[in-house]
Image (cartoon, grey):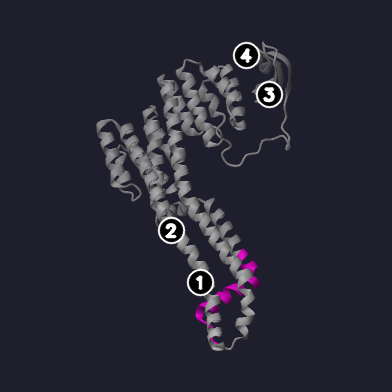
Amino acid sequence: MAQFAYHVKTGGGKQLRGKMSAMDKSTAVEELRKRGLVVLSVNEHRNTILSMDIYIGNPVKMQHFIIYCRQFATLIRAGVTILDATGILAQQTESKPLKKALVDVHSGLLRGNAFSQAVQEHKRIFPSMFTNMIRAGEESGDLEGTLERLAVFFEKQHMTKEKIKSALTYPMVVGFLAISAVIYLLKAVVPQFVSMFDSMDAKLPAITVMVMAASKSIENQWYLWLLVVVIFVVGFITAKRTTSGAYAIDYMKLKLPIFGKLSQKGVIAQMSRTMSSLYASSVPMLQALTIVEEVVANRVVGKVIRSAGDSLRQGTPLSDPLKKSWVFPPLVTQMIAIGEETGSLDLMLSKVADFYEMDVENTVDRMKSLIEPILLVFLAGMVGVIVAAIMLPMFSLYSQMG
């Protein structure tokens, strides 16, 4: 499918310029005329390196995608057709990648494609979760309800992720400031006293000797410290790109002191909310588990979900493999077992997701109140050690002079 740059005029005389995807030039002209536009010019647009949009990671911000889902659900509820709703949202969205994709989706709808088929061509913009739930909504005739569930799902997922980020950001920032302050003191302040201490015949305290050695190491062998940091970062990135390395990193995330429990709760909330939304939208369970494995942000949990899918194919209840894993607390497995027995699995999973989302929020609030004084004491302690290393020999010198 080629890209075409168009120049058109509306019925009100307003001139518009833009880009669209079409099989060929004549198809592009025909689609523009179907929209009630007067075509002034249509030319094939070829991307160059300078004109290409380059994105790293997900090109659409989660906030923009959430707004899109919510507005889409509102328009469908108000009786607006999918075709018109897509055209309206393509004009209103602030995200350029999403706008470009929606214009293309609109063209696909004009060609007679189903909405799920049109969005599937833009996998970087529309996640598999979105595409599969939309397809299930089209088949069941409950697209409005599906869009509502999608909007709630992405809102809840975004809120949980932001809560966890806020809990992790503060200690990382304070830790960085603490390390920066220590390096500055060792590099700029301590060396001014080193020559004086070297000339002293008195025996220096052990803490002073250690600080002086660290200062000389940073001043004379800074490149070795930099090399260690580079090796660590490169090693981490390389390990993360391998299957075994990424699994080991995700395992450590769940086993970290304090933050491991928070990460575990966030992953369980994400898994439960995803599975509940898919099951409520009539997505087949095995297909839902495959999507959950892809969506969940931890490979350790993903492996358990894959095992659950394999067991389900053999007729084993979903809760059985989860009970054997240390990742899932009894509350989760018992709620899932009850949901399977009563036929209300989506409701039980939704309750689990609500519980752990609230638990994450409360845990983050408690952690902030506890971590702040601990980090301040840590920062003061590191600086205090350096100050003490300088002051103790000074006091000794003054006492000898007296």
Q: Residue furthest front?
A: 402
- In the rendered image, residue 108, in percent from the top left (x then y), is placed at 58, 21
Q: SS of the residue at dot 4?
A: loop
User: Looking at the image, which residue is at 43% across and 33% down?
Assistant: 153
Distance in Å between CA atoms under marks 3 and 1: 63 Å
Quarter holding residue 22: top right
Residue labelled with disc 2 = 373
Residue labelled with disc 3 = 18
Residue labelled with disc 1 = 385
Residue labelled with disc 4 = 35
For marks 2 and 3, give the one nearer the viewer. Answer: 2
- The reply to whether the C-beta atoms of the residues labelled 4 and 3 are less than 8 Å apart is no
Could you tell me the amino acid type at mark 3?
Gly
Could you tell me the amino acid type at mark 4?
Arg
- The reply to whether the C-beta atoms of the residues labelled 2 and 3 are less than 8 Å apart is no
- The reply to whether the C-beta atoms of the residues labelled 4 and 1 are less than 8 Å apart is no
Name the side, left or right, on which 254 lies relative to 123. left
Q: Which residues are magenta?
A: 202-226
Could you tell me the amino acid type at mark 2?
Pro
User: Looking at the image, which residue is at 56% across and 60% down?
Assistant: 232
Q: Is residue 310 above or below residue 71?
A: below
Distance in Å between CA atoms under marks 2 and 3: 55 Å
